[in-house]
Image (cartoon, grey):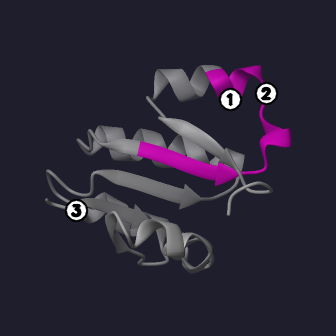
């Protein structure tokens, strides 16, 4: 069985999630969100990035414009989410949002 490739974008996020992810995924953690943009197809199957709301849409948009077709999740404080952010998520195909206060 092939492992899914997951790109974790910050070291602190990798440390918190590693116990869960190591069983089912091949995990990469470069620490810099911009590194995801250098992946060529097919790239990672999933990108999980911890970043502020105002960066999440631009990051997702840049990945999509670069041709990335995989899943993109961001980890942020869900109290900051508003209707405009929800619309932007749909427009740029951001797969989902995890609340930074409730992840393992």
Residue at image point 76% right, 54% down: 102
Q: Are marks 2 and 3 in contact (CB under 8 Å)?
A: no
Q: Quarter-wise, where is residue 97 in the image? A: top right
Figure disc tally: 3
Secondary structure state at the residue bearing disc 2:
loop
Q: Are marks 2 and 1 in contact (CB under 8 Å)?
A: yes
Residue 19 % position (x, y): 52, 75
Mark drawn on residue 82: 2
Discs 1/3, front: 3
Residue 36 % position (x, y): 35, 62
Residue 95 % position (x, y): 47, 35
Q: Is residue 40 above or below residue 93?
A: below
Identify the residue under disc 1. Answer: 85
Q: CA distance from mark 1 to mark 3?
A: 32 Å
Q: Is residue 70 left or right of residue 10?
A: left
Instruction: Write down the region rendered in magenta.
Output: 72-86
Q: CA distance from mark 2 to mark 3?
A: 35 Å
How busy is the neighbourhood of tag 3: few (under 14 within 10 Å), some, or many (20 plus)? Answer: few
Q: Is residue 84 left or right of residue 19?
A: right
Residue 8 % position (x, y): 46, 67
Identify the residue under disc 3. Answer: 3
């Amino acid at each position: 069985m092939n492992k899914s490739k997951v790109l974790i974008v910050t070291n602190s996020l990798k440390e918190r999630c590693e116990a869960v992810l190591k069983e089912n995924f091949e995990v990469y953690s470069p620490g810099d969100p911009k590194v995801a943009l250098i992946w060529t197809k097919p790239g990672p199957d999933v990108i999980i990035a911890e970043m502020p709301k105002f960066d999440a849409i631009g990051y997702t948009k840049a990945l999509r414009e670069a041709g990335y077709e995989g899943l993109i999740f961001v980890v942020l404080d869900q109290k900051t989410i508003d209707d405009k952010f929800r619309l932007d998520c749909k427009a740029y195909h951001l797969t989902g949002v995890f609340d930074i206060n409730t992840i393992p």
